[in-house]
Image: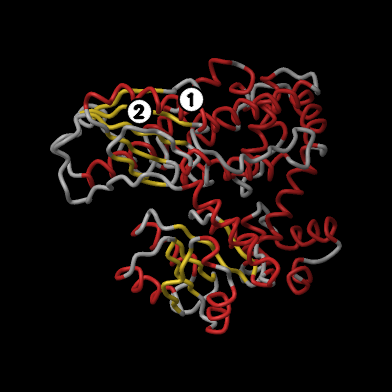
Amino acid sequence: MIKVLIVDDDKLVRKGICSAMPWKDFDMEVVGEAGNGQKALEFLQTHPVDLMLTDLAMPVMSGIELMRAAKQLYPGLHIVVLTLHQDFDYIQEALRLGAIDYIAKVQLEKEQFEHVLQRIYTRINESVQPTRPVPSLEETNVHYSTLYVLVSQDRKSEQPWVSQMNVTDYEMLWEIERNCCMWAARREQEQQLFEQLKELQLQAPQSTLFVLSDVQAQTWSQIKSWIIHYSETELFYKYTPDLRVTTLSMNDDKPLTLAPPQDEKLDQLKQTWFQTPWTHHEHHYRELIHQFKALRLQKGQLTGLLYFIVMEWNRLFAQTSLGKLNMIHSFDSWYEVETWIRQTAASIRQADQQHGYSPEIMGAVKKAVKIIQNDLTQAHTASGLSQQLNISRSYFSQCFKELMGRTFNDYTRYVRVEKAKEYLVNTNHTIAWIAEQVGYTDEKYFSRIFREMTGLLPSEYRQLA
């Protein structure tokens, strides 16, 4: 008999579901009901429940919060969510948390009751697995010398292989995190388990199976922390599609301790990105990749760095013939980041080749743009920069105009006025102060240039903004 708990803050809904559904026809029995998530957890502590139907929107504790707590405390509990509206985001989150189905309350008409329960009953039977012990975190591992961990780099989406594990003859199965599972078996069954896991791995995208030794005399809390930390640091950078199986030791393979990156190394990397050689020469490309990996950034820090680089590039060049870069919106391993960097190099190289200039000339123009943008207070001239970059003035001016779409002087005025607009809108500084910050020592001259380019005086622009 499948024991059912109904959780909904609307008493009439609870009573209606309890009384109207043909539970007995599907070997089910409603053993309790609760008006919120907290009361549901209290009921689960004292009553065996196989199936919980829960609303998502409830006071005290939402259905999502209840699901997270219940799945952690009762991994074998089957959950079906009730929702008044078919809210896609909430439903997707519920399914990711392990719900086997969802029911829109507006669909609960009498003629559909049997169909709904049949669907739930079928899914429960399909997902039933022999229960295996989950260790206490404080307990010390004394039985197993080797553990087997299958981890997918995609830790966000719910994947079928997690809920369809048909691996037999193991003594322990522990879903440590989403899409990260650990098995243990008796010594005489380890080889059979290993072969079965290699078969299971074919269903697990972007996955690595690692055989972990030197785990005895470690608490399960220490083992869990080691696996999570290793997966998020070392494995993040080591993973490739060819890394299917690897052997690790808790004594020898210490997970990386990721320290905050040093500012000077970040600045050096950012400068390297805007120098053309890495997009045209393999040696410089490998050097850039080495700089990236040497930082050993956490995934969040790496995302922030890539966003900065792309936004800065697009700020400088998106409106020119040098082209716009597309951001990598999500990634699960360094392998995917490096693939994106190589594709980006190819797109930059293709844009450069359309102009027929050498990589050295392309790099010189890009460097000139960075020099101008980085210090607007300086009175940069085409003559001065061309000499600094070791290019003839006339050739530099020709290349600059073709690539940037403006003459050197027009471009410098443009970026100064654009920066002045930012100051006018976002600060209360005086016009004189703003003029000085963008390279004009004469406030009246600055105002005249600003009006020529915008049709407004700086004060008028500030009032209208």
Q: Is residue 295 visible?
A: no
Q: Residues within 10 Å of mark 1 (few under 14, many from 20)?
A: some
Q: Position of residue 347 (x, y in %)?
A: 71, 27
* Label 2 element class: strand
**Is there any visible trace of residue 6 in the rendered image?**
yes
Q: Which mark is residue 240?
A: 1
Please state which of residues 185 and 399 is positioned toward the viewer in this rendering. Answer: 185
Q: Secondary structure at mark 1?
A: loop
Residue extending farthest bottom: 12
Residue 63, position in %: x, y?
49, 68
Q: Amino acid at mark 2?
A: Phe
Quadrant in which residue 348 is drawn: top right
The tag earlier along the polypeptide, 1 or 2, is 2
Image quadrant where one finds the C terminus: bottom right
Gap between marks 1 and 2, in whole Å?
14 Å
Residue carrying label 2:
210
Quick one: 126 or 7, which is closer to the camera? 126
